[in-house]
Each structure stands twice: as structure tokens, then as C-alpha cells.
Amino acid sequence: MNFKGTLPTLILQALAEEPSHGYRIAQRIKARSKGVLDFKEGTLYPALHKLENEGLVASYEGVEQGRTRRYYRITKSGKAVLTKDRSEWRELSRAVTLILEEA
């Protein structure tokens, strides 16, 4: 099943919980989806950079266990987009469920 287009929303959701670096974001999404959604670096980082270019996330450097990492946090604009995306996803999900239940 193709979930293309959902990654930015999933990233925003992960960052709404707390600022984080890319690897931890991917691990959080994987854990919360019980392993169904496993985004690799080649997919995750371009999405993070696009969100940053759009002003939906901001990044900063931090040190964790002696390693410098790039951390991301959701912005006010990102929170507004996440609220809209959640609403649209719920509406789409209900519609698809209705159709599949009829089959």
C-alpha cells in the first residue's frame, strides 16, 4: 500500500510531541505504527528539509552522547498545518472505511 504524501504529516506529529533528530523521528514513527511504517534516511531527510524550507519545522544543532546532531522542532505554522492535515486525514479515512465496508 502506498502512503506517499503522509510522511510530512507523520513527521509533524512526531515533532509535536517533542523536538528530535531524524533517526529518532523515524524510530518513533516505526514504533507507533507497530513496524508497518519504516521510512529510511533517503526518504526522511528530504521530507525534513522540505518542511524546513516551507517554515513548518526549524532545526538547530545539539549534542547527544558526544555527537553533534541536527534537531528539528515544529513551528507555529507547522502546528497549524498539522491540525488541518489531521482533520483531512480523518475525513478521508472515514470515507475509505465506508467504501471498503460495503465491499
Image: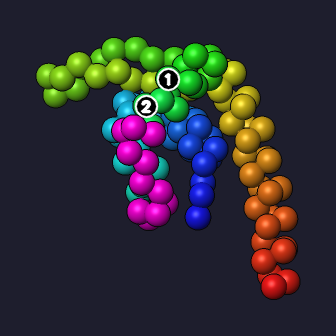
Mark number, residue 45: 2
- Most frequent secondary structure within the magenta stretch: loop
- Dots 2 and 1: beta carbons under 8 Å? yes
The quadrant of the image that shows the C terminus is bottom right
Left or right: residue 43 compared with residue 12: left
What residue do we see at 14% from left, 22% from top? 66
In this rendering, the count of numbered labels is 2
The stretch in magenta equals 33-43
Q: Position of residue 35 (x, y in %)?
A: 41, 62
What residue do we see at 72% from left, 46% from top? 86
The quadrant of the image that shows the N terminus is bottom right
In this rendered view, identify the residue nearer to me: 103 or 82: 103
Q: Residue furthest left?
A: 66
Mark number, residue 49: 1
| Quadrant housing residue 22 | top left
Left or right: residue 99 compared with residue 15: right
Vertically, is 77 above or below 28? above
Identity, as a three-letter code, of the amino acid under mark 1: His
Indicate yes or no whether the magenta region holds residue 59. no
Identity, as a three-letter code, of the amino acid under mark 2: Tyr
| Quadrant housing residue 9 | top right
Q: Position of residue 64 (x, y in %)?
A: 22, 26
Mark number, residue 21: none
What residue do we see at 58% from left, 25% from top? 51
Vertically, is 18 above or below 103? above
User: Which element type, helix, strand or loop, lies under badge 2?
Assistant: helix
Q: Is residue 74 visible?
A: yes
Number of residues whose C-alpha sits closer than 10 Å to that of mark 2, classed few (under 14), some (14–19) or many (20 or more): some
What residue do we see at 33% from left, 14% from top? 61
